[in-house]
Image (cartoon, helix red, strand yellow):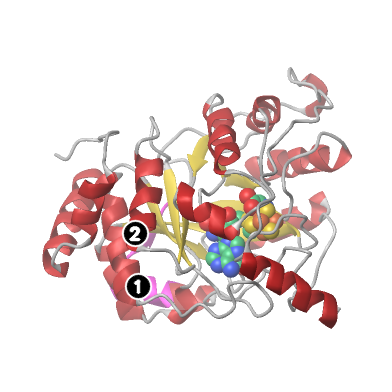
Amino acid sequence: MSEVRHNWTKEEILEIYNKPLMELLYEAATTHREHHDPNTVQVSTLLSIKTGGCPEDCGYCPQAARYHTDIEGNDLMSVQQVKAQALRAKSSGSSRVCMGAAWRNVKDGPEFDQVLEMVRTINKLDMEVCCTLGMVTENQAQRLAEAGLYAYNHNLDSSEEYYKEVISTRGFEDRLETIDNVRKTNVTVCSGGIIGMGEKEEDRGGMLVALSTLNPQPESVPINALVAVEGTPLEEEKPVSIWDMVRMVATTRIVMPETQVRLSAGRTQMTREGQAMCFFAGANSIFAGDKLLTTPNPDVNEDMEMFKLLGLNPQKPFIKKMQPETVEAKDSEYQSLGEKPKWSRPDHKIERNEEAKQKAKILK
Ligand code: SAM
Ligand code: DTB
Ligand code: SF4
């Protein structure tokens, strides 16, 4: 049985990534079977609870206010709207709802209180609840935990070196600190990244070093293929090849054997054969529903057809970890601290981000 190791080096990881494909697939599939049921796939539904208008400059993201993209922004959804969407997701076979907000970080106040109420509401529907809200302090993570949050998604996105080429408004260290804050609670960690942003293989390896040397390793690691959205600095990046996706999934599976490897953004560009290869290589989770946060995703009926074809079954909720208990707002132990955390702002110049910003000024 392959052991969980927390001392992977970039060299070792790149050696795995570059193995002859048949050997890589065999090793990844073997590891996968040792730790997971190969016919079960966890299905999450994404819900963009607050869309667009984000102050950050993430070069891949259509929701950054400074770029001119064709997305419809929205203020924070109501708890009732969220509940209705969660019920729909449940009836279509999802075990988890992942709520995303286009925020740099969580701010204490009425909007965060509303998100906590959303968490309580979905947990009471007996679904796993995940949030991705940007950076959080330990107190904010504790409050989410108390509300019944199952997972917190906070991606490292790339290697520490390449991160600087994509984002200038926050630092890699802040990402690690947020993950650490989530770790101090009983909420599980979901953290992964994006390939196809112009990074080198070494950066893919570097990102997997950063994730696999976390102790414990993240319970879930999303591997996204960049969705190159017009108007973003990365609009001209070429689509990720399926071979790169399979290699990345397989390597992630080998270095993080117990983790749920999530085949995330980019599935609309992939054939069923391609996705089947990813499941064989150890992917055991997807985002379902015809929209990711703002970009298209395969239709849920098509996904269920694919599952039938491949003999895959959606995972039931709370198989890996018990359902958290929800504490009501009035009984809460952790109160709002009204914190104003000092998350970093490196603010170095990224040429292509500047260009996209200038272009947007002309178009807006
Ligand atoms: N604002 C929060 C944050 O950045 O942490 C949460 C939402 S953010 C949209 C969640 C993740 O979506 C990002 O970390 C990134 O990995 C992924 N993402 C955003 N735009 C993407 C794109 N165009 N293609 C692939 N993944 C993308
Ligand atoms: C993750 O790693 N991928 C999801 C989820 N976590 C939040 C988001 C993908 C977003 C793709 C671009 C969009 O739809 O806006
Ligand atoms: Fe904002 Fe998150 Fe998009 Fe960055 S990835 S611009 S923080 S929504």
Left or right: residue 123 versus residue 301 is right
Residue at the (70%, 28%) spot, across then down: 143
Give the side of residue 259 with respect to residue 238, left or right.
Answer: left
Q: Amino acid at mark 2?
A: Ala
Does the magenta segment cover residue 41? no
Percent position of residue 42, x then y: 43, 55
Residue 209 at x, y percent in the picture: 35, 44
Crowding near pointer 2: few (<14 within 10 Å), some, many (20+)?
A: many
Amino acid carrying label 1: it is Gln
Tell me: residue 348, above or below residue 4.
Answer: below
Q: CA distance from mark 1 to mark 2?
A: 9 Å
Disc 1 target residue: 275
Label 1 lies in ligand 2 vicinity (Cβ under 8 Å): no
Ligand 3 location (quadrant): bottom right
Image point 57% across, 41% down: which residue?
Answer: 175
Pointer 1 and pointer 2: residues touching (CB < 8 Å)?
yes
Q: Quadrant of the C terminus?
A: bottom right
| Magenta stretch, residue numbers | 304-315
Q: Which picture quadrant has residue 118? A: top right
Q: Residues within 10 Å of mark 1 (few under 14, many from 20)?
A: some
Q: Earlier in the sequence, mark 1 or mark 2?
A: 1
Q: Position of residue 335 (x, y in %)?
A: 79, 21
Q: Nearer the viewer, residue 237 or 308?
A: 237
